[in-house]
Amino acid sequence: MIQHYVALTTLTDRIFPEELAAVAAALQCQVLRDIAPEWGVSALVAAARFETIPVGYTPLIVHDTLEADGANGFHRTRGDDTPYMLVPYGPNWSLAASHELLRLLVNPSGSARRPGPSCLPGQGTVEYLIDVCGACPDVSAAYVIDGVVVSDFCTQAFFGQAGRPFSFTGAATSRLAPAANGVVSWLADDALLYQTRADRQGRVRVHGGFSTANRARMLLRELVDMLMPERLPRLSSAPLTNRLLQAVQNDRRARLATLTRFQEDIAWRFGHASAEATDTMPRRPGRRPKFYAAGDARSGQNSPSEDVAMTARTAS
């Protein structure tokens, strides 16, 4: 299994460290639980301050919106081709971050393709760019992990392998056909790039061909991002659907229940539990729990004089 190392970081002061860490944890879960079994790739995702990005990690950088077309998405440094990703900040920036991360993991070269039949008459078999989130990027296709919204992604079946579903959440309903606000790109034998783009209602139109001759050192994925510069800002600013809002609320309730469970049990074991909590907690055979006020410096330990006094009262 191919292993990547990704540092989620930020260049905007609108993201607190706690939020950055929560999104990194959700992305890590998505990679290990969802994308790895389907595509055979994995990654270690860590939250880091921009000044402390570990050596060898690919930076996934959230920033304030840039005005230049094509500034967002996947890039390589001009000096040594070190890869990095730029994601615009917005109220739903985790969706855009997940979108870019999964694209990188499944197609790190940015130019990998698979053959398939063209939807245009006369083109025959063409080469489809493997863009696992391109066909199903819309917020309506997204899902939630631990209260964090993440992107849907295409399965191997979408690009021609036998089986179903065609995307993880089922938003993509047929092979090589984009779902709402999605795009599918391919190269034909005339060396031009073509795209099928779907609108919000799923209506599809063909665009192209676009010349690839003047893209210089740009990867095909970078060319696709140049052709659709509004895609990532739209994801970052997308309002959550009622389904996603409900999922976020359910995750928050589950986390609160887990937090309460551990807090009460730890408090009981250290002797700081409330009287109400101790009534329903199991006791160890042959032992009596000891209770102290929160902040007591004794931390659950009796002093020798108290033990003697306890023994005397019991004996009498």
Image: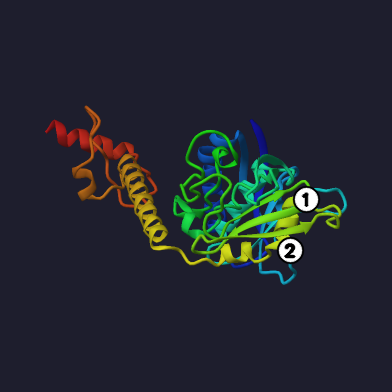
The type of residue carrying mark 1 is Leu
Residue 227 higher or lower than 189, as above or below: below
Q: Is residue 108 left or right of residue 78?
A: left
Q: Residue most toward the bottom? A: 67
Badge 1: residue crowd in 10 Å (few <14, some 14–19, many ≥20): some
Does the image show residue 123?
A: yes
Looking at the figure, which quarter contains the C terminus? top left
Counting the numbered discs, the total is: 2
Residue placed under numbered mark 1 in the picture: 219
* Residue 279 screen position, x and y as percent: 18, 44
Residue 51 x %, y %? 72, 56
Q: Which residue is at a point 57% across and 67% down the rendered structure image?
A: 90
Q: Secondary structure at mark 1?
A: loop
Task: Identify the residue shown where x is 15% and y is 33%.
Answer: 314
Farthest left residue in view:
316
Q: Nearer the viewer, residue 260 or 156?
A: 156
Kindly state the secondary structure of the residue where label 2 is placed: loop
Residue 236, located in which quarter of the rendered image? Answer: bottom right
Provide residue 58's location: percent of width, then percent of height. Answer: 71, 47
Residue of label 2: 70
Dot 2 amino acid type: Gly
Which of the two labelled residues, at mark 2 and mark 1, occupies the earlier sequence position? Answer: 2
Q: Residue furthest top?
A: 286
Residue 291, percent across and down?
27, 45
Real-space CA distance between mark 2 and mark 1, rounded to the nearest whole angstrom: 12 Å
Look at the image and tell me whether residue 74 can be seen: no
